[in-house]
Image (tube, grey):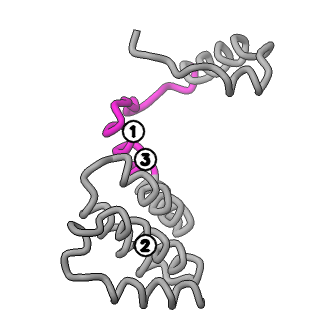
Amino acid sequence: VTAHSYFTISMSLLPPDHWKSQHSFSRRLYLSLAKSAYACSDVEKAQGILQEILGECCCIKDKLPAYYLLVIILNARGEGMNAYNTCKEVLFELGEIVPESVETKESTKMIESTSKMTQNISDADLMGMKEMDEN
């Protein structure tokens, strides 16, 4: 509760053009305020703050922490489909395509194939692999 109060006071001290003049600081402060509001069970306030962050930030990199907390909140509220759709939209912005549907048989085959390919690779080796490219 104390952190939430401090963040709220800090926010009230920002200049009117803070999203332009102090964008990075504003983004971090608003995210901290959203986290503290959520921790204090003020979910509506947390979601409102997150929506403001998402509206003010242009870069997906700046939006990711807000999207992450938003998905957690949506899922906790039992809005799994909204959480899923939000994740799907974020992945699309990141250049990933999520299929509309996958048949159970097809997904089972993909999981089995992936498991076989990775069964002899240690966790440390997996973590050390470079990311896949488009090729």
Q: Secondary structure at mark 3?
A: helix
119 relative position to 27: left or right: right
Magenta-span inclusion, residue 89: yes
**Is 15 in front, or is 71?**
15
Say which amino acid is labelled 1: Leu
Do the residues under discs 1 and 3 have CB atoms within 8 angstroms?
A: yes
**Which numbered disc, 2 or 1, marks the residue that appears first in the sequence?**
2
Q: Mark 1: few, some, or many residues within 10 Å (few <14, many ≥20)?
A: few
Q: Residue at x 54, y 19 (%)?
A: 106
Residue 92 sits above or below residue 114 on the image: below
Q: Residue under circle 1? A: 91
- Picture disc at residue 87: 3
Front-lying residue, 127 or 105: 127
Q: Which quadrant holds residue 83?
A: bottom left
State the separation of the CA atoms marked 2 and 1.
Answer: 25 Å
Looking at the rendered image, the disc whose residue lies closer to the viewer, 2 or 1, is: 2
Earlier residue among tags 3 and 2:
2
Count residues near mark 3 (Cα–Cα under 10 Å), then give few for <14, some for 14-19, many for 20+. Answer: some
* Magenta-tinted stretch: 84-105
The percent position of residue 87, horizontal first and vertical second, equals 43, 47
> Residues under labels 1 and 3: Cα distance?
6 Å
Instruction: From the top left corner, tell me how far across and down residue 113 is, in percent.
Output: 65, 13
Residue hosting label 2: 29
Kindly identify which numbered label has been placed on residue 133: none
